[in-house]
Amino acid sequence: MNWKKKKRAFSILRPACMRYILNAGPQLSKDQLKSVLKQIELTYPEGSEVTMTLAEVFRNEGIDEGLEKGRKEGETQALTKMAAKVLTKKFGTISKEDMTRMETLNTASLELIIEEFWQYETLEALKKKYF
C-alpha cells in the first residue's frame, strides 16, 4: 500500500479509534477531556478537525440524553398528576405526605395505580400495595 493510501486509511480510522478509546475507558471529566483533545490537536496537524468532529458527536449525544431524561421526567410528572386526580375523585383529598410518596414512584407503578385504583375500597388498601 502506498503512503497516500495509508495516510487516507489512517485519517478515516483515527476518529473511530479515538471515539472508542474515549468511550471504552473510564469516564473523563470535562477538564480531562479538554486536555486530551488539546493534546490531539498538538500531536496531529489535522487534530483540530478531528476534535471538532468528536466534540460535535459528544455534544449531540449529550443533547439526546438530556432530551430523553426530560421526556421521562415529563412522563412521570404527568402520570403522578393523573394518579392524584383519579385517587382524589375516588377517595377524596390526598395528604401531602401521600403526594410526596407518589412523586417517588416509577412510571410502571403509577400506570398500575391509574389502571387499578377502582378495584380498591380504601386509599389505605391501595397504599399498602404501591406506597
Image: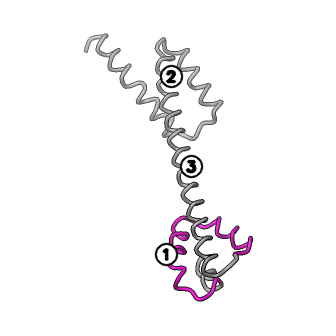
**For discs 2 and 3, the disc positioned in front in the rendered view:** 3
Residue 70's tag is 3
Q: Position of residue 68 (x, y in %)?
A: 51, 48
Q: Residues within 10 Å of mark 2 (few under 14, many from 20)?
A: few
Judging from the image, the colouring scheme is: one colour
Q: Main structural element of the magenta stretch: helix, strand or loop?
A: helix
Residue 119 covered by magenta stretch = yes
Q: CA distance from mark 2 to mark 3?
A: 27 Å
Check disc 1 and report the residue beneath it. Answer: 115
Q: Position of residue 2 (x, y in %)?
A: 27, 11
Magenta range: 94-123
Q: Disc 1 on helix, strand or loop?
A: helix
Placement of the N terminus among the 4 image quadrants: top left
**Residue closer to the observer: 74 or 12:** 74
Check disc 2 and report the residue beneath it. Answer: 52
Q: Disc 2 on helix, strand or loop?
A: helix
Q: Disc 3 on helix, strand or loop?
A: helix
Mark 2 or 3, nearer chain start: 2
Q: Residues within 10 Å of mark 1 (few under 14, many from 20)?
A: few
**For discs 3 and 1, the disc positioned in front in the rendered view:** 1
